[in-house]
Amino acid sequence: MADKYDTVVIGTGQAGTPLAGRAAAAGWRVAIVERHLVGGTCVNAGCIPTKALVASARAVHMARRGGEFGFGLPGDPVVNMARVKERMKRISGSSNAGVQKWIDSMDGVELIRGHAVLDGPNRVLVGDRILETDRIFINVGARPNIPDLPGVDEVDFLTSTSIMELEEVPEHLVVIGGSYIGLEFAQIHRRFGAKVTVIEQGPRLVHREDPDVSAAVQEILESEGIQVRLNAECIGFSAHPDGIAVDVECAEDPSPTVGSHLLLAVGRIPNTHDLGLDTTDVQIDERGIIGVDDQLRTSVRGIWALGDCNGRGAFTHTAYNDYEIVAANLFDDDPRRVSDRIPCYALYIDPPLGRVGMTEAQARESGRNVLVGTREMRHVGRAKERSETAGFMKFLVDADTEELLGGSVLGINGDEVIHSVLDVMYAGAPFTTISRAVHIHPTVAELVPTTLQDLHPLENP
């Protein structure tokens, strides 16, 4: 016999949980289904635990730099990975418990443990239970992609999830993938004391960024002793007495890179493969991404897709904004849209990269008359005080409309500083709103107005 609900939410991630609470507050009877840990990727295997590791790695790194700041240690800091992991788990576990407590406090919400499978557009099966509803919200997240490379099934490898279970520092960590996730773990484990090699098939790291950003990121990582191999033509794996051999060239007898541990960091794919979408007319692409419109509605009336599985952001902050958009349209008569969202994100190497809006390539393709302003972090007082002068800031402006088009802040506090630009972009205000502002000294953000006061035409590459 079927149980009837006003809505079924599949997944307790950053969009699903608040949406369940909002629906219940509106008087709906809500079922929220979770097959693993409440809180989704961010809480359990993403932002929170990884940034806890970044913090531990930074503490070790700064301890090693004591001589620059006038103090010394008896020897090199000793990293106890078991304790590092315990700290990470404690922080992540606290967040997980907080989400559980939040769900438990929601009147009208039933948390159902198990794997949800759609059986048509109005029915969800969870074990032997049948849930019927007129509204289904899919918030199933994504998982690490395992590339189909030669030998991948013959060796042990780590993913962005399993690497956080390590209780020892790898002797030599080989990272496949030179983008955001791979680079964060590369620097973390290098600072913990591992030898690290990053192998990237493309011609540069973080290829979605501007070339100058990619080059600066590579310089930062190489300055800490991370080996970077670009243009890896033929990646393949095989067992080796010292661990895992990674081939990177197409030559008959190339010298492989041999590591003790292998991390595959080549993107993530949506958890839609076992959701039963084939019993509906919900449109998905070849990667499993669910197609949605500007208000997160799928091709089937009464089914929405939020978060990583819809391909419209794949960040914690965009997932939560997906919830806000759906809730505004359903409950507030407020027609919010995904297209109103300005792209923004960060790369959490240290120093971090904060990014917003267009890249240089996108600005050129737009056909606009573009101005650019840049300033190196070595000219920023706060950076010099902290002896953290790597990186630069760069901002793009439409010369005709004075609109801010985008920005990159690679450097100390870059992930925070970028918000001063992002907020003005959301306000639709001209760049002079910042360039004429008086910011506090000494901060990194005080150089944002200065940089915007020194604009020049963006040259072709």
Image (cartoon, helix red, strand yellow):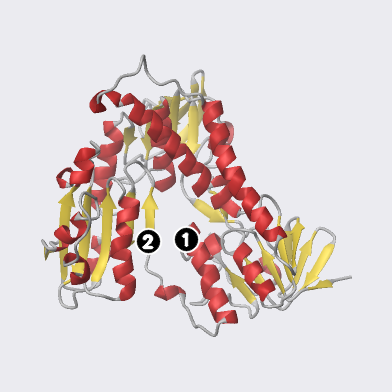
Q: Locate the C terminus by quadrant.
A: bottom left
Q: Locate the N terminus by quadrant.
A: bottom right
Percent position (x, y) of residue 327? Answer: 57, 75
- Residue 366 position by quadrant: bottom left
**Vertical order, 183 against 13 (above or below):** above
> Does the CB distance between marks 2 and 1 fall below 8 Å?
yes
Side of 383 where 291 appears, left or right: right
- Residue 85 position by quadrant: top right
| Callout 1 secondary element | helix
User: Residue placed at 59% from the left, 80% from the top?
Assistant: 330
Q: Nearer the viewer, residue 156 or 389?
A: 389
Amino acid, disc 1: His
| Callout 2 secondary element | strand
Percent position (x, y) of residue 39? Answer: 61, 54
Q: Does residue 316 appear in this view?
A: yes
User: Residue placed at 60% from the left, 45% from the top?
Assistant: 94
Q: Nearer the viewer, residue 178 or 412?
A: 412
Side of 443 where 323 appears, left or right: right
Q: Does residue 314 appear in this view?
A: no
Percent position (x, y) of residue 243? Answer: 51, 23
Label of residue 317 in the image: 1
Ranked by sequence position, the earlier of labels 2 and 1 is 1
Amino acid, disc 2: Cys
**Which residue occupies the extreme top position in the image?**
74
**Vertical order, 355 against 118 (above or below):** above
Name the residue that disc number 2 marks.
344
